[in-house]
Image: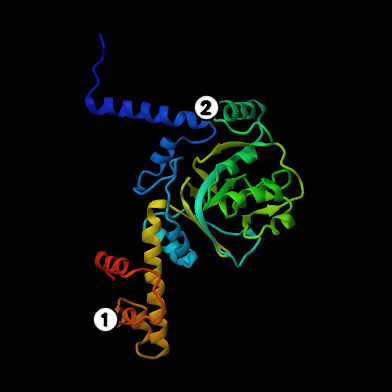
Amino acid sequence: MAVQLKTPLKILILSLIGWGGLFQPLSAQQVGSTSEQIRLLTAEWTGERFPDGRPKVSDALLERLKNISIEEAWGVLRNKGYNNQYEGDWQIIWPDSVMTGRVVTAQYMPSRPDFEKHVKTTGVEKEGRSPKGGTNSWPIDVLVNGDVYVADSYGKMADGTLIGDNLGNSIYSRSRRGVIFYGSVRDLEGLSEIQGFNAWIKGQDPSYIREMMLTSINAPIRIGRATVLPGDVVLAKKYGVLFIPSHLVEDLVLTSEVTGLRDQFGHQRLREKKYLAGQIDSEWTEEIKKDFLNWLENFPGKLPMNKTELDRYFKERNW
C-alpha cells in the first residue's frame, strides 16, 4: 500500500528534489552555469539581464560607483547584513586607478586527471567551448563590455599564473576592464603596457600554468574573505575590493553619495564654526537638517544624483 505523505512534508521533499536536480549539473555535468541557475542565484534582482542570466546593472551606476569610498560602501553593506564582501591586501598594476564592473566568476582547483578530462569533454562537446589552448581562456571568451573577470585560483603563485600579456590583451579587448585574481599572473611587465587594463592580484611569477584546472564559470566562488556571485558589481580601489550584490547597487550608490554630501556639509560648517563638533557628530537637530537641505539647494556644482532620487531618499529615510 502506498504511503500518503502529508502535504507540507511532500512539498519539502519535492522542493529538495527539485533544487538538487537544478544544481547537480553545476558540479557534475557542466562547466558554465545556465541562465536559469544564475537567475535563481540572483533572484532579488528585478531589472534587465544579459542573455547568460547575469543582472545588467547600468553603466551610469557603474560610473557613479567609482566616486564612492570603500568605507562608505562597506558601511552600507554591513547595515544590510552583508558582512563578507570585502577583501584587501592586493598587488595592483595601477594603484591610483579605480575599477568598477559586472562580475564574471571562475573557479580553479589543483589538477585531477579524471575530473579534468570530464571538464574538457563537457566544455568542448556540450557547451561549444574552444578545443584549442588551455581552459583558462574559456572565462575570457564569455566577457562583454563592462565585465570584470574574477577568479579564485586558491592563491597559487608558481605554476598558477592564469594569464600573461596575450590573454590580458584579449580580456581588455572584450571587457574594457581588467581582472581580480586570488592568485597570480605572469609577464606583469607586459600586462602593464596594455593601456586601460588593470589587475588586482595576490602575486606574480614568470612560470606557466601547470597542475591547475578550471572547474566552473559563473558559479559562486570565494575570494579571500568574500563570497562572490556572478553578476555582482565590483568596486576595486587601492584600499581594497568590494563585491556588491546587484540588487543593492542603486541604493548603495545613492546612500553613499548622500553620506558624502553630509560629510562635506558637516566639515564646512565646522570650519566655519557654525556648529560644535558634538552637534555634527550626533543626531542632527531640525535646524541643522534645514540648513543641510538649503545647502543642497545651493550646492556649488553638479550633485551626483538627480532631484527625484534625492527626494525619494529623504522620503524613505529617517535621517
Q: Is residue 181 visible?
A: no
In the image: residue 294, left or right of residue 157: left
Q: Position of residue 260 (x, y in %)?
A: 41, 73
Q: Is residue 162 above or below residue 28?
A: below
Quadrant containing the C terminus is bottom left
Q: Is residue 267 visible?
A: yes
- In screen coordinates, is 318 left or right of 25? left
Quadrant, the N terminus: top left
Q: Which mark is residue 210?
A: none
Q: Amino acid at mark 2?
A: Gln
Q: Which residue is situated farthest in the right direction here?
A: 206
The part of the image, by quadrant, that contains residue 195 is bottom right
Which mark, residue 290? 1
SS for tag 2?
A: loop
Q: Residue 242 at what x, y percent from top left?
A: 50, 57
- The residue where tag 2 is placed is 29
Q: Nearer the viewer, residue 311 or 222?
A: 311
Q: Earlier in the sequence, mark 2 or mark 1?
A: 2
Q: Is residue 114 above or below residue 88?
A: above
Residue at image x 41%, y 85%?
Answer: 268
x and y, in percent, of residue 82 in the image: 41, 54
Name the outermost residue toward the top: 1
Label 2 to label 1: alpha-carbon separation: 60 Å
